């Protein structure tokens, strides 16, 4: 896990990238847009990646198409490798090579790069969870929609 530095400049850049309206299929009705945009900016900065902003992927790193998935968490929590990263089941058709998972404190003072996983490996190894299932990793989190999930410990930093 890598802690990413959030700066005022990063936040301003994220605001310029996107209009923070409601995206299609947004469960949070657009509330996660700022977090998602900032996650993309931070990963782009860390890897000196190329920003693409397509429906299918966000960045190019080492000629690989990366879709960045950023999840907010309470600022008083420190992420650990048993936390669950998940993707809604309706979101399986994006044409990316890898998913990159990022965690961000809800006060926007800390962010963490959890790692990458090839898209095909994610869907071959992730566990399918039905809407309403409780996260089996000890949290009280309930899946808001049918989802695929895996632990942070299953991610890595290799883009092969």
Image (tube, grey):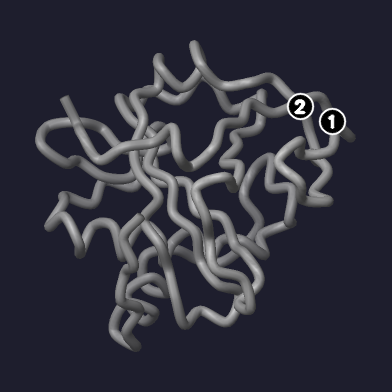
Q: Earlier in the sequence, mark 2 or mark 1?
A: 1
Outermost residue, top direction? 124
Question: What residue do we see at 50% from left, 54% from top?
Answer: 70
- Neighbourhood count class around disc 2 (C-alpha, 10 Å): few under 14, some 14–19, many 20 upward: some
Above/below status of 121 relative to 60: above
Mark 1 lies on a secondary structure that is loop
Q: Is residue 90 above or below residue 80?
A: above
- Mark 1 nearby-residue class (10 Å; few <14, some 14–19, many ≥20): some
Q: Are marks 2 and 1 in contact (CB under 8 Å)?
A: yes
Place residue 149 in its image quadrant: top right
Compared across the picture, whether 128 is left or right of 140 comes to left
* x 77%, y 50%: residue: 139
Instruction: Tell how many labels.
Output: 2
Marking on residue 2: none
Residue 33 picture location, percent across and down: 56, 61
Comparing 37 with 75, the one in front is 75
Between 91 and 101, the residue placed more toward the observer is 101
Q: Locate the N terminus and report the quarter of the image it occupies.
A: bottom left
Q: State the separation of the CA atoms marked 2 and 1.
A: 5 Å
Going 25% across and 40% down the picture, which residue do you hit? 157
Q: Is residue 154 left or right of residue 59?
A: right
Q: Which residue appears at 33% of the width and 44% of the height?
A: 58
Q: Position of residue 160 (x, y in %)?
A: 16, 24
Q: Which residue is mark 1?
A: 131
Tag shown at residue 146: 2
Vertical comparison of 117 with 78: above or below: above
* SS class, disc 2: loop
Please provide percent x and percent y for residue 53. 34, 47
Q: Residue furthest right?
A: 132
Q: Position of residue 121 (x, y in %)?
A: 40, 17
């Amino acid at each position: 896990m890598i802690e990413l530095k959030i700066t005022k400049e990063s936040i301003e850049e994220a605001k310029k990238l996107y209009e923070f309206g409601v995206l299609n299929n947004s469960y949070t009705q657009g509330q996660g847009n700022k977090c998602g945009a900032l996650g993309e900016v931070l990963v782009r900065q860390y890897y000196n990646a190329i920003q693409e902003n397509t429906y299918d992927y966000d960045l190019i790193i080492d000629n690989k198409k990366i879709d960045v998935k950023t999840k907010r968490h309470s600022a008083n929590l420190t992420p650990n490798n048993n936390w669950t990263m998940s993707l809604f089941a309706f979101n399986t058709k994006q044409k990316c090579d890898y998913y990159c998972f990022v965690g961000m404190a809800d006060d926007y003072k800390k962010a963490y790069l959890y790692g990458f996983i090839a898209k095909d490996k994610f869907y071959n190894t992730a566990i399918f969870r039905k809407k309403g299932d409780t996260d089996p990793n000890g949290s009280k989190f309930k899946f808001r929609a049918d989802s695929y999930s895996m632990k942070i410990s299953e991610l890595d930093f290799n883009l092969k």
